Image (cartoon, rainbow, N blue to C red):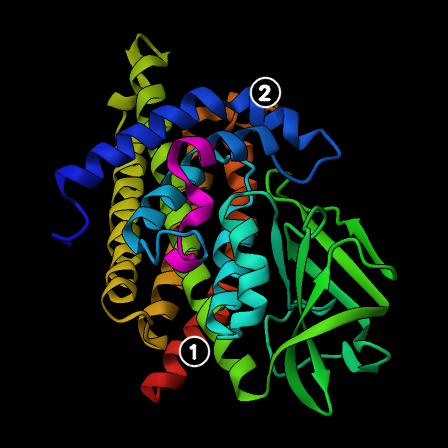
Amino acid sequence: MTLIFTTQYDDFRKSVRGFLDQESPESRVRAVMSSPEESDTQTWQALQRTYEVARIGVPPEFGGVGPAVLQAAVISEELGRSLACVPFLGSTVLAGTALRASENVGIQRGALPQLAEAESVACLALAEDAGRWDVGKCATVAEPGADGFVIDGSKSFVLDGYQADVVLVVAAMSGRPALFLVDGHASGLSRTLLPTLDQTRKLARLTFSQVPARLVCSGDSTVSAIETAMATSKVMLTLEQVGGAERLLEMSVSYAKLRVQFGRPIGSFQAIKHKCADMLVAVTNARAAAYSVVEELEATGRVSAVRMGAAKAYCSDAYKQVAEATIQVHGGIGFTWEHSAHLYLKRAVASAELFGSAEMHREIVGRELGI
C-alpha cells in the first residue's frame, strides 16, 4: 500500500477531515436528517469549491480531472467517518461511472459538464422493489415513443433519486437490458422518499409512467457499464465503512479512558480492553481489505470478483461489529438518541445491505473459487 499511505495523501486526508469537522459536524448531519431534503446541498457545494469533488472521474474534455481513484478513496473514507449527507457515492461515483462507461459521447457531452461543476445531481435507478441490484432482472420496460422511447415501471432504493436532475434508468427493451437517460423534471416521473433505517442516507422510489427517455446504450454495453459502475461504487462504499468504523473505535477508546467506575477508568477492565482490541483488529483488517481493491482499481481500472466480494463482505461485517461494540463500551448512554453511536450503527446495518449483502458477496467468492 505504498501508493496510498504517502505524505501527500496523509496531508490530503487531514485537510478533508478538518474541512468536514467544520462544515458537516454532527449537528449539521442531524439537521439534514430531520429535513425533507435528501442531501446537504450546502456542504456539497462547499466540498466542490474546496476540493472539486464532483470533477472526480469525469474526463478532462468534459471538465473533470480524470479517474483520481486514490483521491476518491480518501474522500469516501472521510465522508463515512463524518456521515456527511452529500451525493458523492450516488451521483459522482455510481451514476457518473455508469454514464462514463456507456461510451455514448453525445450523452456524455450533454450531461457530464454539469455534473463536473456540481450544477446537477445524477442517480442510477437499477434496483426494484425486490431490492436486487441485478441488471439482468428488470421489470421496468422501455418502448419506442413519438420522440425516442418511453419508460413504464418503478425503481426503489435509488441513491440521490429524490433530487436528481439526471436520472439513468435500467429498463428492459425487447427483452434485453438497456440504459436510458431521463430528465429529472420529465412528465410522468414521480418520486417518493422511502422510510429507511439510516436517515443520513435517504433513498427514493421512482415511478415511471410513459416517461420520455433517451437511449444511452443497450445489450452487452449496458451490462458492462453497470458492472463497472457497481464495482467502483462497492470499492468506495468499503472505504466509507472503514472511515465510520475507525471513528467509532476512536470514540470508544476515548470514552474508556474517561469513564470511571469503582474508582478506575473502565478501560482498565479486562473485558473493555478485549473489546477495544477486537475493534482495532476489525478496523485494521477492514482497511487492508478496502485498500487492496482500491489499489487494484487504480492499477487496472477494474476489480476481480473474488477480491471485491471478500472486501465488501468483510468490511460490512467489521463495521457492524465495531458499531455494536461501541454501544456496549458506552453502556447506557450509547443507547440514547442524543449520542452519535446509533447513527453509525444504522449506517453500518444499511451499508451492509447496499449493493448486496455480505452473505451474497461470500457466495460470489465461493462461486468464483469453485467452492
Determine which of the numbered discs, if any, sits on residue 364 in the image. 1
Name the foreground residue: 307 vs 332: 307
Mark 2 residue type: Glu
Mark 1 residue type: Ile
In percent of the image, x 59 and y 70: which residue is there?
A: 133
Question: How far is disc 1 from disc 2 in space, using C-alphas?
Answer: 39 Å
Q: Residues within 10 Å of mark 2 (few under 14, many from 20)?
A: few
| Secondary structure type for disc 1 | helix
Q: Indicate left or right for 336 with 282 as reference.
A: right
Q: Quadrant of residue 42?
A: top right
Residue found farthest to the bottom: 174
Identify whether 330 is placed above or below 153.
Answer: above
Q: Indicate left or right for 155 with 360 as reference.
A: right
**Majority SS type along the magenta span:** helix
Residue position marked by numbered label 2 in the rendering: 338
In percent of the image, x 28 and y 35: which residue is there?
A: 13
| Secondary structure type for disc 2 | loop
Q: Residues within 10 Å of mark 1 (few under 14, many from 20)?
A: some
Does any portion of residue 355 appear in the rendered image?
A: no
Span shown in magenta:
47-61
Does any portion of residue 215 appear in the rendered image?
A: yes
| Residue 320 picture location, percent across and down | 46, 47
Quadrant where the C terminus lies?
A: bottom left
| Residue 296 picture location, percent across and down | 25, 66
Name the foreground residue: 339 vs 21: 21
Q: Earlier in the sequence, mark 1 or mark 2?
A: 2
Q: Indicate left or right for 91 with 125 as reference.
A: left
Q: Is residue 25 magenta?
A: no
